[in-house]
Amino acid sequence: MIDAAQLVQQEEETTSRELTDMLEPGERAEGLKAVELALLAFLGVKVVVPIVCSFVGRELWERYDRIRSRSQAREAREELADQALSKATVEPAKVLAPIIESLLEEGVPAEQAARIAENTYRRISERVATHE
């Protein structure tokens, strides 16, 4: 069985890197300020945590389908630490819609928001499936 807390941490890092990679090469070359890095990391949390919750149970996903604050993210991570992951309990489209909407609200272009959310969902789904 895969450890939910470890999966969240690894996927947050991967998703944050994906978000950084979407920046124009010149923006990456100039280096990101600490505030920008923190924002990208939080965007990664807003993508990963709801997806992992959807592999635990509908009730948990409904509580954390949209992460709005760092304290809510921390609370979700604490709940996930003791949970077993299984097959998806919520349809992928339902999981992805609020995540994409949240990224759009943060200024991520639509095509990139969808790609990042879908890639993250696919990776998590594959990792959960290989550990069942």
Image (cartoon, rainbow, N blue to C red):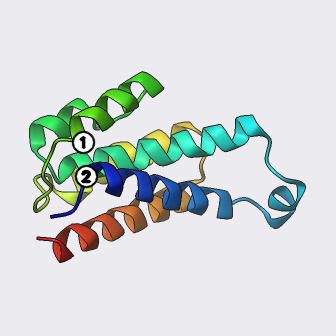
* Badge 1 element: loop
Q: Position of residue 61 (x, y in %)?
A: 20, 40
Write down the quadrant of residue 78 in the picture: top left
**Image vertical order of residue 4 relative to residue 42, above or below:** below
Residue occupied by mark 2: 4
Residue occupied by mark 1: 81
* Badge 2 element: helix
Residue 124 — which label?
none
Q: Quadrant of the N terminus?
A: bottom left
**Image vertical order of residue 51 relative to residue 61, above or below:** below
The answer to whether 106 appears left or right of 64 in the picture is right
How would you rate the neighbour count of disc 1 (Cα within 10 Å): few for under 14, some for 14-19, many for 20 or more? some
Q: What is the three-letter code of the residue carrying label 1? A: Ala
Q: What's the CA distance linking mark 1 and mark 2?
A: 6 Å
Residue 127 in sight in this render: yes
The answer to whether 15 appears left or right of 60 in the picture is right
Q: Position of residue 46 (x, y in %)?
A: 43, 41
